[in-house]
Structure formats: structure tokens, C-alpha cells
Amino acid sequence: MISYVTYKIIHYLGIFTAVTAVAAYAVLATGGSPLQRDAWTKKLAAAHGIGLFLVLLGGFGMLARLGVSHGGLPTWIWIKLAIWVLLGGVLTLAKRRPETAGWVLFIAPFLAAAAGTVALLKPGL
């Protein structure tokens, strides 16, 4: 049986991986040769996806250890899920509109911090 602390570490690892991948992808989208971009875009997209998966795995693992029902999730969990959907979409934004890369680089850590704030304050509980 995996402990609450282990799930929390997995969750944090996912957060750091996803935000780092978004930051690197945003920087890559702004320049570099096409060969450099092609070599890194798939790796960074994979790291981003793995990071988001680890966030969900760790988050829902912690909820299971806390005994939160999956049928009736509290409002704060839905808010966090919405924030992580946004974080998932910013990679596509940087890819399709490289001129937004600076904004993406700036907003990704704030989205992660907002999700952390929601977890601490648990609004709607």
C-alpha cells in the first residue's frame, strides 16, 4: 500500500516536471533552428504529459488515503482540475502561437501556485 506521503511526493514531482516542460517548451518555441525544435518538442511534450499524469496519480492517491469519495468530489478539487486543464493547454498555445511563449512562461508557475493555494485553502469545503 502506498502511503499519503509517497503520493504527495509523486504529486510534487508531477508539478515540477509539468511546469519545467512548459517553461522549456515556451523558450524553444521562440527561436532556435527547426532541427533543434524538432529534436526537443516531442521530448518536452512527453515530459509535460508524464508530469500531468503524475499530478493526477499523486492527487487522487492522496484523496483516496484521506477517504474522499470519488462520486462527490468537493468544489476545491474541481477548481484544481480546471487549473490543471489550463496548464495542460498552455503547451498547445505556445506551439501554435509562438508569440505567446513569453506569456506562457510567465503564467505556468502562477497556475501551479494557484492550484497549491486552492489545495491549502480548500474553498467550498
Image (spheres, rainbow, N blue to C red):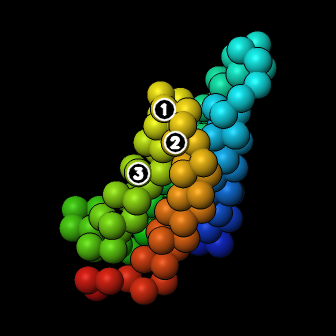
Q: Quadrant of the C terminus?
A: bottom left
The residue mark sitting in front, 3 or 2, is 2
Residue lying at the far left in this picture: please name it. 72
Residue 24 lies in quadrant: top right
Marking on residue 86:
3
**SS at badge 2:** helix
119 or 91: nearer the viewer: 91
Q: Mark 1, residues whose alpha carbon is within 10 Å: few (<14), some, or many (≥20)?
A: few
Q: Amino acid at mark 3?
A: Leu
Q: Which residue is mark 1?
A: 97
Q: Nearer the viewer, residue 72 or 23?
A: 23
Which residue is at a point 21% across and 67% down the rendered structure image?
Answer: 72
Q: Is residue 69 above or below residue 93?
A: below
- Residue 17 in the image: above or below residue 26: below
Q: Is residue 3 visible?
A: no
N-terminal of the two: label 3 or label 2?
A: 3
Mark 3 neighbour class, 10 Å CA radius: few under 14, some 14 to 19, many 20 or more? few
Give the residue type at disc 1: Arg
Q: Position of residue 83 (x, y in %)?
A: 40, 59
Measuring 48% from the left and 71% from the top, which residue is drawn there? 114
Residue holding disc 2: 100
Marks 1,2: beta carbons within 8 A: yes
